[in-house]
Structure formats: C-alpha cells, structure tokens
Image (spheres, rainbow, N blue to C red):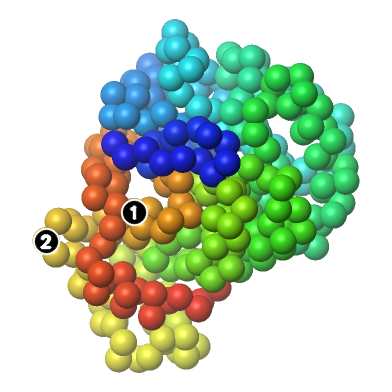
C-alpha cells in the first residue's frame, strides 16, 4: 500500500481508503450482517487501509463501522465523517450539527474523529454555511472531538463542483481537507480546484471516482454517444462500443482498474475512496492502486478527450 500526506494535516493516509456510503451503504442495502461488515473492515486493515470515510446520513454506517473497529488501536487508523446541513426536510440548524456530532462519536465508539466535514456545500450557500456552522466545528475542535476541518462537494447538483475553487480562494487557511469527485469522466477539478489545494496544503480525498456510469458498459456507451451528439468529443474520437476498452492492456486488466489508477494519478490526491460490500471487488480495487498511474499516452489521451467536460457522469 502506498501512503500519502493528507495536505497540511500531517496525517499519513493510505492511497486506498474505504467508504461506507455508495449504492450499497456498507452492505446495508445488500443484506450484509455485522459479522460480514466487520470482516470487510478487517480485510481493509490487513491490506493496509488506514482511512475510513462515513457519514451520519448513511443509514447506520457509523454504528456498524464503530463495532467493526472495536478493539483496533485507535492510533492505527483515521476516521472521516460528514454532516449535511440540508436534508429532505429542509435546512438544519446549529443545534442539529452539535447533536449529530455527539451521536457520531457514540456510534463510532471514539472520543474524536480525525476529519469532520460539512457535506455537500454549494457555492451559493457558502457564506451562510461558514457563518452558521464553522463556529460549531471550531468548538468541537477546541474540545478535542475533531482534529481537522473539511467540506465535500455536492457533485450531483453541481457537476462542476464550483464550491472547491470558491472556498479555497475565499478562505484558504480555513479548510484542511476537501472531498471531491475526480476521475476519467470528471476531470474538471484538475483545472483550478486541485492546483489550489496543492498551493494551500489542503488534502484531497477523491470520492466516487469510478461511479456513476463508467463501470456499467451500457451506461458508458450511452453517455459517450450523448457527449458526441453534444459536440463535447469528436464522433470518431473513440469507439461507440466499449469506448474505453483501449485502456485495457499490459498491467491494466479492466476499465475499472484504469479508472482507479487515473483517479490516483494527480499530485493533489491524497487518497481514493473505494466503497464496496464485496470482498473480491475490494481486493481488486486496492490492487489497481498498487501501480497508481496509467501509461503516459493513455493518460494524455483521456485528458484531451474529457478534460474540459463538467457534467454529472
């Protein structure tokens, strides 16, 4: 396992980290039992993973993760959790943030989290979020319940993830970590956001780099056809069928493997989050990051093809 510095935090984090969200939400939607989820976490540890990402809104993921890590020395792994200031019932208040944090600590069976993130900030709401919720985050840090401050993007509502350059230009010293989506089909973060992160020592956690359409051949072909119709890429630039199959050669055994390698191959990226309820998928994803780069010609071609596209994919 390769380890990288998480920006100015000083944390040394595994290049592959484990996320408890995604479609299966740590196997909660797949019928996994606690013993299976615990086995998955312990396999992560065996493979060198030392960073776990969760969220108060991922069902009972925090509680499941806390139980799975029970008995593991706390200084041997890092915890990232998130809190959403918006919900299906509308905006949430400051008291809800503090109450949720206490519940997160209880469910995670820990006295502190390494990174606490305000989840899914939009640029249009940034000033309000900072004014209302950062003081709560600071108080938690003063109390020793949080080590570092972070935020994540809401890439479905904001595919360009404009919040990242906006926040890092507005408050370059406020944030320690940012969680964003960067991958083969979502490269726009390499334009301004990730250079700003490097410049300001902000650690980057790369989420959903292989979701949504890339790992499903039919959806990928449909997306590429759509992008050709829109003029984003030339009609003859890549094949209509198996449009990224040319990435599979030598030590790259699948398009998914190529996607993980590409997601890690940027100097800003500290860790690539993989979320799965399948042990075989876990091992395959982590194996792809043992050599975290594509062949130069392939990376260059991908950047020329998709580097300027900012769409939900």
In this image, 83 relative to 290: left or right?
A: right
Picture disc at residue 250: 2
Q: Secondary structure at mark 1?
A: helix
Position above or below: 9 against 99: below
In contact (CB < 8 Å): disc 1 and disc 2: no
Looking at the rendered structure, the number of numbered marks drawn on it comes to 2
Q: Is residue 197 visible?
A: yes
Q: Earlier in the sequence, mark 1 or mark 2?
A: 2
In this image, 179 relative to 287: left or right?
A: right
Q: Please name whichever residue, 177 or 103, is drawn nearer the observer in this view of the structure.
A: 177
Q: Among all residues in the image, which is located at the extreme left?
A: 250
Q: Among all residues in the image, which is located at the extreme top?
A: 71
**Quadrant where the N terminus lies?**
top left
Q: Position of residue 273 (x, y in %)?
A: 44, 44
Q: Position of residue 97 (x, y in %)?
A: 79, 32
Position above or below: 10 against 228: above
Q: Position of residue 6 (x, y in %)?
A: 51, 41
| Quarter residue 142 falls in | top right
At 68% across and 50% down in the image, what residue appears?
Answer: 120
At 58% across and 49% down in the image, what residue appears?
Answer: 201
Q: How far separated are the C-alphas under marks 1 and 2?
A: 16 Å
Identify residue for label 1: 260
At 29% across and 24% down in the image, what residue appears?
Answer: 46
At 64% across and 14% down in the image, what residue appears?
Answer: 111
In this image, 72 relative to 1: left or right?
A: right
Q: Position of residue 170 (x, y in %)?
A: 77, 58
Picture disc at residue 127: none
């Amino acid at each position: 396992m390769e380890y990288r510095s998480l920006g100015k935090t000083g944390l040394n984090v595994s290049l592959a980290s484990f996320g408890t969200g995604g479609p299966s939400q740590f196997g909660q939607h797949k019928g996994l039992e606690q013993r299976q989820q615990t086995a998955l976490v312990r396999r992560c540890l065996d493979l060198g993973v030392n960073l776990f990402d969760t969220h108060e809104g991922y069902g009972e993921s925090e509680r499941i993760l806390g139980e799975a890590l029970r008995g593991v020395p706390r200084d041997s792994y890092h915890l990232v959790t998130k809190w959403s200031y918006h919900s299906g019932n509308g905006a949430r208040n400051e008291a809800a943030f503090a109450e949720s944090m206490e519940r997160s600590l209880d469910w995670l069976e820990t006295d502190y989290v390494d990174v606490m993130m305000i989840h899914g900030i939009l640029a249009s709401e940034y000033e309000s979020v900072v004014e209302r919720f950062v003081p709560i985050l600071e108080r938690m840090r003063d109390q020793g319940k949080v080590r570092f401050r972070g935020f994540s993007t809401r890439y479905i509502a904001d595919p360009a993830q404009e919040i990242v350059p906006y926040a890092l230009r507005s408050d370059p010293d406020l944030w320690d970590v940012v969680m964003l989506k960067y991958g083969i089909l979502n490269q726009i973060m390499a334009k301004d956001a990730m250079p700003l992160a490097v410049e300001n020592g902000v650690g980057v956690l790369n989420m959903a780099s292989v979701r949504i359409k890339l790992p499903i051949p039919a959806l990928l072909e449909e997306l590429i056809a759509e992008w050709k119709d829109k003029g984003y890429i030339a009609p003859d630039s890549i094949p209509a069928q198996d449009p990224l199959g040319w990435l599979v050669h030598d030590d790259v055994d699948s398009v998914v493997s190529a996607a993980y390698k590409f997601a890690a191959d940027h100097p800003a990226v500290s860790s690539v989050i993989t979320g799965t309820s399948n042990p075989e998928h876990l091992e395959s994803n982590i194996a792809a990051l043992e050599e975290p780069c594509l062949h130069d010609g392939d990376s260059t071609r991908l950047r020329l093809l998709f580097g300027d596209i900012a769409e939900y994919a």
